[in-house]
Image: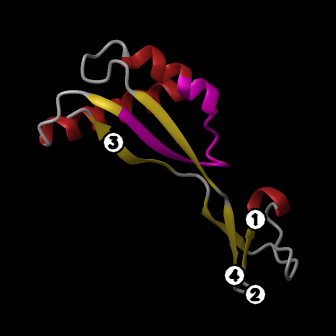
Amino acid sequence: MHELGIIQSIAKTVKQTAAENGAEKIASVTLEIGEVSGIVPDILTDCWEYFREKDPVLSGAALKLISAPAVTWCDDCGQTYETVVYGRTCPHCRSGRTWLLTGRECQIKEIEVYE
């Protein structure tokens, strides 16, 4: 379950950012999660709910998730396509010379604080 490690890292970053900006309590954290990141959203949310209650700065803070689509680039024809639908073979030219452009990320998009 790597989701707990992800949440611990996110919590550390959020708390550090809050401290740097003089925020005492976090209202919510919005994460962008790539659709082929391997992260299970339900487990991530469960880990957040467990972990947030261990810290007064995060206690009660909501976790909001945004899905980032997986997009693949084809080196042969220079086009992009939906990774989940077509996999590693380009639907435009049938090439296998492709690479994932987006879809594996896990990043903090927004931190909302109580004023």
Q: Is residue 72 magenta?
A: no
For numbered disc 1, what is the local secondary structure? Answer: strand
Residue 82: which disc? 1
User: Which mark lies nearer to you, 1 or 3?
Assistant: 3
In the rendering, at what x and y percent does residue 65 appear? 54, 40
Give the CA separation, mark 4 to mark 1. 15 Å
- Amino acid type indicated by mark 3: Ile
- Decide which of tag 1 and tag 3 comes sooner along the chain: 1
- Amino acid type indicated by mark 4: Asp
Q: Quadrant of residue 28?
A: top left
Residue that mark 2 sits on: 77
From the viewer's perspective, tell me whether residue 91 is left or right of residue 63: right
For numbered disc 4, what is the local secondary structure? Answer: loop
Query: Which segment did they paint magenta?
Result: 28-45
In the rendering, at what x and y percent does residue 39 appear? 61, 37
Residue 111: which disc? 3
Residue that mark 4 sits on: 75
Q: Residues within 10 Å of mark 4 (few under 14, many from 20)?
A: some
